[in-house]
């Protein structure tokens, strides 16, 4: 069924918040299983799949530093949080029979492989889901930027930004009933209008390398599969 898929290799950016469900913190096991199922469906199509996972459901560096903590220390804690999420997602996928590897940008060899680009691409070629943990490995960055970076490093054709809303709006759709959704944007529109897609570092990286981004609602069943099969969904950010 390879022919059904439009993309051969994709990177999915999954925020930590996507895992927390209604609990407002941590990892909701039911949501985790749902997400693992969605990812499995894509892998079954023969699509080489990488996932960059966030950590905001556990710890966010900026938030802690606003309360007085040293920013770099707080960011390292945030990166550790992403490793916890990565292991949870790995567990969910493997329980469903999907082969995975966690590659961490901060070395933690008892729980994950170190990030080595050529190893990542090899895993992808073998059909394993590669879960990138610890963001870029650097404080003052985000996992959105890590997603853009890794997507380019492993040669993904598209970056799939999974969110809680079904695309990019001109204003917050959870607060304004007249918010309008964009079908398509270019990178400069995102940057100049400060639209909430990803942070500006991530958008700039995508822009310089013409990496298309699809922003879509991940929790609607079957959506990732629809996107990789080329259905228009959510908002496309592209040149
Ligand atoms: N972080 C970092 N460098 C990176 C990626 C992440 O310092 O390259 C830290 C940062 O403190 C951030 C936290 O890890 O707040 C969790 O990541 P992020 O906020 O991107 O997660 P998400 O919003 O996707 O859940």
Image: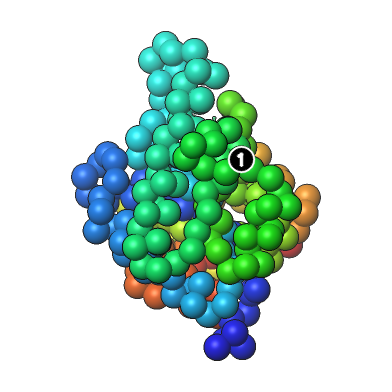
Q: Is residue 216 left or right of residue 130?
A: left
Q: Position of residue 207 (x, y in %)?
A: 73, 52
Q: Can residue 234 be seen in the rendering of this structure?
A: yes
Q: Position of residue 42 (x, y in %)?
A: 49, 73
Point 50% across, 59% down: residue: 100
Q: Can residue 203 be seen in the rendering of this structure?
A: no
Q: Is residue 227 left or right of residue 209?
A: left
Q: Is residue 134 left or right of residue 174?
A: right
Q: Most extreme residue toward the left, as rendered?
A: 23
Q: Quadrant of residue 37?
A: bottom left
Q: Position of residue 31 (x, y in %)?
A: 29, 58
Point 32% across, 56% down: residue: 32
Give whichever of 26, 159 is nearer the camera: 26
In the rendered view, would you say 150 is above or below 199? below
Give whichever of 177, 34 is nearer the camera: 34
**Quarter of the figure that contains the N terminus:** bottom right
**Quarter of the figure that contains the C terminus:** bottom right
Secondary element under disc 1, as helix, strand or loop, is: strand
Point 44% across, 75% down: residue: 41
In the rendered view, would you say 37 is above or below 5? above
What residue sits right under mark 1 in the picture? 114
């Amino acid at each position: 069924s390879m022919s059904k898929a439009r993309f051969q290799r994709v990177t999915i950016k999954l925020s930590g918040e996507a895992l927390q469900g209604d609990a407002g913190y941590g990892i909701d096991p039911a949501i985790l299983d749902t997400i693992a199922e969605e990812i499995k469906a894509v892998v079954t199509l023969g699509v080489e799949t990488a996932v960059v996972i966030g950590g905001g459901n556990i710890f966010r560096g900026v938030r802690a530093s606003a309360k007085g903590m040293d920013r770099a220390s707080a960011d390292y804690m945030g990166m550790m949080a992403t490793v916890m999420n990565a292991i949870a997602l790995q567990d969910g996928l493997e329980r469903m029979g999907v082969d995975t590897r966690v590659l961490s940008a901060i070395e933690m060899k008892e729980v994950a492989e170190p990030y080595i680009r050529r190893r990542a691409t090899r895993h992808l070629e073998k059909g394993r889901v590669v879960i990138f943990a610890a963001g870029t490995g650097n404080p003052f960055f985000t996992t959105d930027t890590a997603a853009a970076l890794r997507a380019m490093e492993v040669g993904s054709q598209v970056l799939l930004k999974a969110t809680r809303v079904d695309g990019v709006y001109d204003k917050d759709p959870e607060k304004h009933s007249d918010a309008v959704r964009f079908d398509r944007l270019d990178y400069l529109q995102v940057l100049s209008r400060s639209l909430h897609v990803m942070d500006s570092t991530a958008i700039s990286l995508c822009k310089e390398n013409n990496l298309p981004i699809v922003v879509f609602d991940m929790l609607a069943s079957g959506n990732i599969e629809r996107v990789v099969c080329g259905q228009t969904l959510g908002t496309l950010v592209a040149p």
